[in-house]
Amino acid sequence: MSGRLGRLAIPTGTLLVMLYLLFPVVVVVLISFSSARFLSFPPPGYSIQWYAKLLADPDWLNSLSVTLQVGALTTVFSTLLGVPAAFALSRYGIPGRSFVTALILASLITPTIIKGLSLYLFYVPLGLVNTIWGLAAAHTVSGLPYVVINTIASLRSADRDLERAAVIHGASPLWAVMRITLPIISPGIMVGAVFAFIQSVHELLVALFVLGGVEKPLAVKLWAGVRAEVDPTIAAVSTGLIGMAVLAYACAGAAQLLSKRRGLPAAGP
Amino acid sequence: MAADKTPSRGAAVRIDRLRKTFGSAVAVDSISLDIPAGSFVTLLGPSGSGKTTTLNLIAGFLSPDAGAILFDGAVVSDVPTHKRNIGMVFQNYALFPHMTVFDNVGFPLKMRTKLASADARTRILETLALVELNGFEARYPRQLSGGQQQRVAMARALVSHPRLLLMDEPLGALDKKLREQMQFEIKNIHRSIGTTFVYVTHDQTEALTMSDLIVVMNHGKIEQAGTPRRLYETPENQFVADFLGGANLLPGTVAAVAADHFGVAVEGGFTVQVPRDRVVANAGDAVSVLVRPEEVGVALTEDRQAGTECVAGTVTAVGYLGDSLKLEVAVAGIAIGAKLARVRGLSIESGQRVYVSWPRASARLLLRSAR
Amino acid sequence: MTVPVADPAPARISLDRALVPALLLGPTLLWIFFFFLWPLGLMVWQSFIVKDAFSLDHYASLFTTPIYARALWTTFEISIICTVGSLILGYPVAYYLTVGDARIRAVVMILVIIPYWLDYIVRSFSWLILFGRRGLVNRFLVDVGLIAEPLQLLYNLGSVLVGMIQIMLPLMILTLFGAMLRINRQLVAAAEIHGASPWRAFWSVFFPLSLPGVYAAFLLVFIISLGFYITPALLGSPKETMISQIIMLVATELFDWPLASAAGVLLLAVTIAVVIAYNRTFSIERLWGGKEA
């Protein structure tokens, strides 16, 4: 890679790869505003008819509600479980700590089809199939790793002396954790929570097994729509999902910024 | 300045056979120590010596594997940290960034006491005056310089009149001039407050300047504990001799034992006389002779005065330090360092043949340990 | 020193020192047990059941029935190609991120992370629009006159790979980038000062040092590729059926839960095997800041 040609090769290559990665986004977003009645790219004109159609469709709205409920429950459970677990793993020399960590992270690399199938087998006799709580419980397993990893990373970069300074000057250890450490690491926790939420919103296979009936989340309905390939409504849903993700990550980013402004040494992942 | 002088408000601290290991590494190796009430004690040693671990054990951030810590005769090893009623200044100050100086300093009062807010306010302002930060109450830590943050940290640690103040290398992040200034200020605060100070540092100058009692630590054990003068003038082993101040340690063997002195055959082939102290040594023991560089004189002619040891050598290095001259002289293969004051007009060059001499009485015998 | 107080107290692990981590970690472990491990156990158990008796029939069936055996092989094949493809495309980008200046790095980084905001359905679906008979590519080629009839660009190995690589690339790039950052670039400078051309310096210093990271990224992407469902289902023909699709088919259309479980166990076993290989280079302890092996 000598000379000018070599110098250009990598940036050019990178640019092409970037296009490869992003073109689909652009395509889908543009089509969602298409004035045509079927999927054609580029769109002949622009309109918001598909969004209007979506918002008027009770089925889609119901799916949105289901998705948000499952997502919210997943996020709450993942955070309530994951943050204390992260503290336990970070601060205490637990025997077999690596093993426990591996266990928590295992769901990240377990193929989702397996998770879906096994949970279905588990849920049927318990009557948890087709329940929002059932799906949320399942998604929590997948959301936990994100919260745990981000919280552990935040704890690592947080200045532990602040907590010690509070304790030695009279604060109980619990007070110090809640009022000093948690605020400092909360941006990091938020990032983890957002990942857990988005993971739940996007997840398809477990949802197909566990909540594929009348009440179904957006991902399931989207999947059916995409196979049918009828009209750009699908694109509008997809764009909506993108928007939801952007909003969620923006919130996490804003939390980080805000915390920096207040002078807290924001310990991010 | 507040005249809040309650004499000996500090606690007497006793450490009894304290031991702490991390896995297979022994950080603190069954040490015992008595810290008098109201004194300024420095734990001095290189990194890994166990001084910080000992401090953390006293603070309660670590639990001992064996042994006990007592404040005024009462065992505190089981008392949780936040109930020990002590203060601490951290290396990076650890000021709460989202609180003003006023709230930072007032924190221990809020946590520990039920002082009425008017009384608390008075106390906070008094303490700020003590560290000479009047007028800074409304500022935030990020608006302060390193030195100012350090003082806020001190004020916070002192405001509730703790019986013990711990300081973990608090001056490490400051530049030299500021550090020296702060050393005196800390000492002054100690004198006016009267509480017990336990200070950790690796800097021997700091220890010598500020302490009533220095505890030299190495590999988790206490090498020697004593006043600065005692440690400097009568170190009990090579480590302490070398750690505090410059030291020439001439290796040799005891050749003769007389009533008031030892004759030591120094490796390299000359014999010196060393006064007998409380050190017990027999003929044939491997020893080192300690001679402080400032005791060493360098001249072009031999010094035949009684009571003076004198040997010939060649100058190998010369360093000009402004207020002094540092010389290294090779004497029979051994490097002897000399520190000469008042160098104006003196001209010595590398390669010159000179005579080094020192008063016999200033030399000291140290047993050579395996360490 | 005066008279010691008493014999030094022996080490006491007081009850609450063990209690606190147990309380913090317990709920999580219980949750993972009930909603992850136990179900997996059920699945494994189911795979060995034929009419209430232990049997390996289902596994035999998987290997002997042509459709299923093909799918096993196809899964492996597609995953390897996808991983290699991602590596080839991703390595230069990761390298660029590592050596490029801060501004470029920030921009590229954002562009790499944006795809994470999309779900797999969207990303696969967009290829349908681009490569369909009436899609952008075909219409362009027809309009320009290069072809008369629209090409069949979809529902083949190519379209599946294009879709999968697009999804796996960000992960590959970020993992490689993370590993490359740890390489001491002064070593490359040292090579250049002593006569190596930039290319030689890269090839004989940087590249070999990046290999452990390459290995780790390869395994990671491979593991995840194995489990793909959406992309091959949407963009592939029956010839590109991967094992997840088999499992879905057998479970939801044939209702043969034991057979589906067996396939699931196979997939899980391969995943675990690859993880063990991964762990050799890239152990979990690094999470705690341990030194690189």
Image (tube, rainbow, N blue to C red):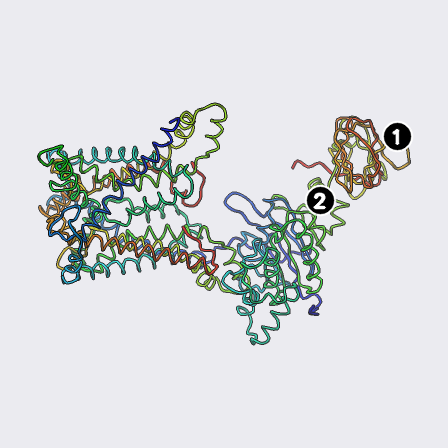
Left/right placement of residue B343 relative to residue A61 reads right
The residue wearing badge 2 is B244
Mark 1 crowd level (few <14, some 14–19, many ≥20, 10 Å Cα): few
Residue C279 shows up from this direction: yes
Answer with the quarter of the image where residue A197 lies. bottom left
Left/right placement of residue B162 relative to residue B312 reads left
Q: Are marks 1 and 2 in contact (CB under 8 Å)?
A: no
Q: Position of residue B19 (x, y in %)?
A: 57, 50
Q: Nearer the viewer, residue A52 or B80?
A: A52
Quadrant for the N terminus of chain A, please.
top left
Which secondary structure, mark 2? loop
Q: Nearer the viewer, residue C245 or A232?
A: A232
The reply to whether label 1 and label 2 mark residues of one chain is yes
Q: Mark 1 belongs to which amino acid?
A: Thr
| Pointer 1 or 2: first along the chain | 2
Subunit ID for the residue under disc 2: B
Going 60% across and 75% down the picture, which residue do you hit?
Answer: B119
Q: Mark 2 belongs to which amino acid?
A: Leu
The residue wearing badge 1 is B301
Image mark for residue B101: none
Callout in the foreground (1, 2): 1
Residue C263 shows up from this direction: no
